[in-house]
C-alpha cells in the first residue's frame, strides 16, 4: 500500500531528524546545557500546579 509506505518514510525521516538534532545538542558546552535545563525547570513548574512550591535553579 502506498499510504503505509509513505507513513513509514515519514516516520523514518522524523526519526533521522531527531537523531541529528540530539547529536548537535550533545555537542553544546555544559554551560549552555545547564541554561536549557533551567529553562525546562521553569516551564515544568509553571505547567504543573503541584510543583508551584518548587523553585528552579538560580544561575
Image: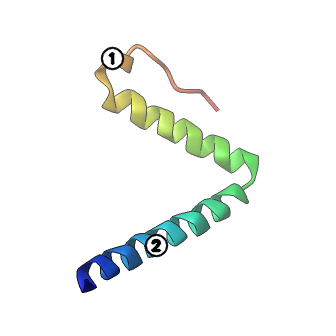
Which sits in the foreground, 1 or 15? 1
Mark 2 neighbour density, 10 Å: few (under 14) some (14–19) many (20 or more): few
Rendered-image quadrant of the C terminus: top right
The residue sitting at 67% across, 49% down in the picture is: 32
Question: For mark 1, what is the residue?
Answer: 50
Relative image position of residue 10 (x, y in whole percent): 37, 76
Q: Is residue 54 above or below residue 22?
A: above
Give left or right: position of 17 versus 5.
Answer: right
Relative image position of residue 28 (x, y in whole percent): 71, 57
Rendered-image quadrant of the N terminus: bottom left
Numbered badge on residue 28: none
Give left or right: position of 39 versus 9.
Answer: right
| Of labels 2 and 1, the one closer to you | 2
The residue sitting at 49% across, 20% down in the picture is: 55
Give left or right: position of 17 versus 8.
Answer: right
Mark 2 or 1 closer to N-term?
A: 2
Numbered badge on residue 12: 2
Relative image position of residue 16 (x, y in whole percent): 53, 71
Amino acid at each position: 500500500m502506498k499510504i503505509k509506505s509513505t507513513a513509514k518514510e515519514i516516520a523514518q525521516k522524523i526519526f533521522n531528524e531527531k537523531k541529528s538534532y540530539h547529536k548537535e545538542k550533545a555537542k553544546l558546552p555544559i554551560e549552555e546545557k545547564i541554561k536549557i535545563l533551567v529553562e525546562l525547570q521553569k516551564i515544568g513548574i509553571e505547567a504543573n500546579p503541584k510543583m508551584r512550591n518548587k523553585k528552579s535553579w538560580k544561575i
